[in-house]
Amino acid sequence: MTCLFSTAVFGQVANEEGKDNIDWSEDTTEITTIKDIIKIQQQVTNRNATEQHFADVWGRRGYFNFSYNNTKLSPKGSNFPNGAGGFVSEMKSDWGASIQYGRSYRLHKKPIANVATFNIDYTGIDLNVNHFKAEGEGKYDSRDRHAGEGDKKSDSFYTLPWNMEKYEVNYGMSLGPSLTLAPFNLLNGNGLHYIKFNVFYHIGYNVSMIYSPNDKKLDVNQSGVDGYDDASYKAMESNLKMSWGHGMMQSFGLNVSWKAIGIGFEHRTGKIKYKAMNTSDFGNNEYEFTSATNRISLQIRM
């Protein structure tokens, strides 16, 4: 009995001096339970997942376009001999292809209402190849001559064979504003958030080259025809029939994308002044064309 009484007294004293007693009268609503901790952790995890999701939605600002081209070259001015006794008419490509690479730079830190961004696009690579068939009955006549620029003597130079088969290669760069919309971001379906529409307007500069392969069968100046000129025929039989030019261009278009895949349409116009590469035979004359290209693109977003 003495031992039990001593233990009870010791417990009472320890309880009076200890600091770990629970005050049952205090407000227990301020106590954080394990359930509350789990709930807070879930909220943080969900918020981080949402932020990561929309960061992915608004990512992929780089673009790689593979396009099919349809190009027209329209001569400006009346002094445009085609080398076959006539004048150059509008030329239309029968096929064309292009590759573009660029990047969009956002003008503000976060998307507006999470549905729109304003950007500046820079297309650093814009490479195009277009093919034009030979046109007309008389494709080329090596006997045709023209006066060179600033040259008082007439019929000094050979005429460029604009009517022959041609390959046009041009390279350019462009810069301009664009608007990107993700209108389904306010809906619950996460897959719909990746559908984006982009409209743009770009201004740039390009350098172009036109090359006509040698085909002596297309020369009207053949042996046995009236006025046959053997010297002209031999001079043009393997001559370099190439011209180059440069000029400003502008374009506008629309792209629709989902995640890394998209399709787009672009219309590009500009004026290009061409000059023969072989000026000793073709002279220094400049020939101005209006170039108009429509492109349908498969887009890869990065």
Image (cartoon, rainbow, N blue to C red):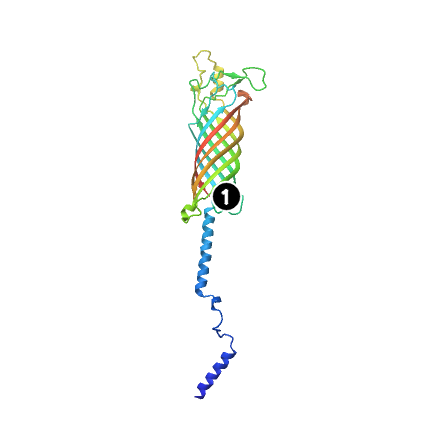
- Which image quarter is the N terminus in? bottom left
Outermost residue to the bottom: 2
Where residue 272 appears, x then y in whole percent?
52, 27
Q: Nearer the viewer, residue 261 or 193?
A: 193
Where residue 118 appears, x then y in whole percent?
51, 42
Q: Nearer the viewer, residue 70 or 106?
A: 106
Residue at left offset 46%, top offset 48%: 56
Q: Nearer the viewer, residue 60 or 265?
A: 265
Asked if residue 226 is positioned above or below residue 175 in the image, the reply reads above
Visible residue check, residue 259: no
- Count of marks placed on residues: 1
Visible residue check, residue 118: yes
261 horizontally vs 273: left or right:
left
Instruction: Specify the amino acid type for callout 1.
Output: Thr
Outermost residue to the top: 226
Where residue 232 appears, x then y in whole percent?
49, 16
Q: Nearer the viewer, residue 275 or 238?
A: 275
Residue carrying label 1:
117
Q: Quadrant of residue 155?
A: top right
Where residue 3 appears, x then y in whole percent?
45, 87
Secondary element type, mark 1: strand
Residue at left offset 48%, top offset 81%: 12
